[in-house]
Image (cartoon, rainbow, N blue to C red):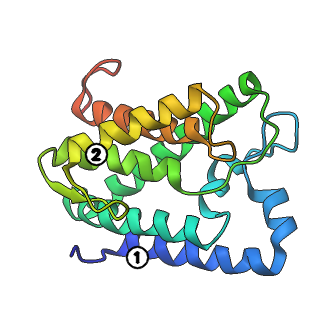
Amino acid sequence: MPQLPPVTQALLLINTGVFCLQFLFGFWMDRLFALWPLGTGFLPWQVVSYAFLHGDFGHLFFNMLGLWMFGSELEQVWGRKRFIQFYTASLLAGAVVQLLVAPLLGSQAPVVGASGALFGLLLGYALLFPNRTIMLLIPPIPMKARTFAIVFGVLALVLGVSNTMRGVAHFAHLGGMLGGWLMMRYWRGQPPFGRHR
């Protein structure tokens, strides 16, 4: 069981605290801080704030479980600064991709949840520890981290393109993976980025 480093712990507490505030101010929290499509209530700060709201307890629980599973070890390896950079890149890329794709899908629904950032963490974990075994909860099937990331990425793509499982922001998940992948390449000085010092 991974330890709980400070940024991961803070993210767990903030997400849980915001979820409690949603009980008190539900409509206003969603109206102001969920990620609304462009032209239907979008406000600039929503590209960050959406990642701290959740639809229900199950949504919060599984996202926080993923944050603990993948984020704890990544923060220990990268340190606080890089972990914050990676998490932020993933959630921002998730928001941008969702905003770009929502008009194509005709979606007017707002997006909430840390899933985009979590998909980024999953990708980062799979790139750092590709052969580490992960156990799914439902069903309890062990698989390598690399396989886990590929399966979840392909599922998000198929479900997003087929526009099934409405109410799930599949392209925010894919955007989170894209943001994490780009951040890893930036750190490594790989294309599309040049070498940096």
Which residue lies under the disc numbered 1? 9
Q: In which quarter of the image is the C terminus?
A: top left
Which residue lies under the disc numbered 2? 148
Location of residue 22 in the rendering, given as x and y in whole percent from the top left corner: 74, 74
The residue located at (29%, 67%) in the rendering is 72
The residue located at (14%, 53%) in the rendering is 132
Amino acid at circle 2 = Phe
Amino acid at circle 1 = Gln
Circle 1 Cα neighbour tier, 10 Å, few/some/many (<14 / 14–19 / ≥20): some
Query: Which residue ends up furthest to the left in the rendered image?
Result: 131
Q: In this view, does 146 lie above or below 25?
A: above
**Front label number (2 vs 1):** 2
The residue located at (24%, 77%) in the rendering is 3
The residue located at (51%, 78%) in the rendering is 13
Q: In this view, does 160 lie above or below 88?
A: above
Mark 1 secondary-structure assignment: helix
Is 174 situated left or right of 46 in this image?
A: left
Asked where in the image residue 81 lies, by quadrant, the reply is: bottom left
N-terminal-most mark, 2 or 1: 1
